[in-house]
Amino acid sequence: MSSTTWLTIGKITGVHGLAGNLKIWSFADSPDTFKKGRKVRVKDEGEDTGGEFYIISNASAQKKGIRLTLEGVDNRNQAEAMVGKEILMDKDQLPALDEDTWYWEDLIGLEVTDRDLGYLGTIDRIFPTGADDILVVIGNKSEILIPVNPHFIDDVNMDKGQVTTVLPEGFILE
């Protein structure tokens, strides 16, 4: 039995022209992720199931992301109706990752322990910033934001389901 894991690879931020081209804010490291012929799912943000399936007919890197054309999206009105939605791709279609690289969805739910402070909580979500992605860790006492940066992340052990951090000296949990 085949199990499909859909990972969010971008968000539709606008349209380009009259022919149904979409402007995408890409979460992928490479524009090659959006190769012609790959199947994607377009859904509302936060929706667990549902969405519409499309085949990529064209993609090109732009100054601020990706310009994407999907089969069946042929005019500006169809494209505008998709603005704000997420684009997902089956994990099996994505390139293999380096040893110290993970998909965001693989990190959600992992336990976070600090080398000095002990158990902090679990990763609830991750969001991008201009510098580093940010882990949102929910613990018993508070919500903690931790940059995904080698200065703060000591180890990610997927087998144990655990992330070990090194928070700055003087960091206090409230």
Image: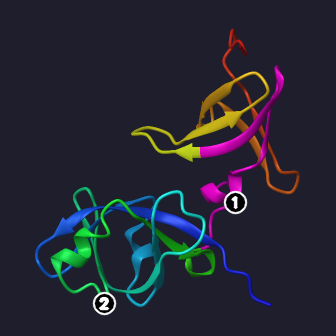
Choose between 64 and 70: the one closer to the eye. Answer: 70
User: Compared to 52, does 24 lie above or below?
Assistant: above
Question: In the displayed structure, does residue 137 sit left or right of residue 85?
Answer: right
Q: Which type of secondary structure does the marked residue at label 1 adopt?
A: loop
Labels 1 and 2: the sequence-earlier one: 2
Q: Is residue 101 magenta?
A: yes
Task: Name the residue type under label 2.
Answer: Gly
**On the image, numbered disc 1 is attached to which residue?**
99
- Residue at 73% x, 27% y is 166
Q: Position of residue 138 (x, y in %)?
A: 71, 34
Q: Is residue 4 magenta?
A: no
Task: Name the residue type under label 1.
Answer: Glu
Q: Position of residue 85 (x, y in %)?
A: 39, 64
**On the image, numbered disc 2 is attached to which residue?**
72
Write down the region rendered in magenta. 96-125
Residue located farthest toward the left when viewing the structure as drawn: 18
Q: Position of residue 169 (x, y in %)?
A: 69, 12
Pick the quarter of the image with the C terminus: top right
Disc on res. 31: none
Question: In the displayed structure, does residue 143 sit left or right of residue 73?
Answer: right
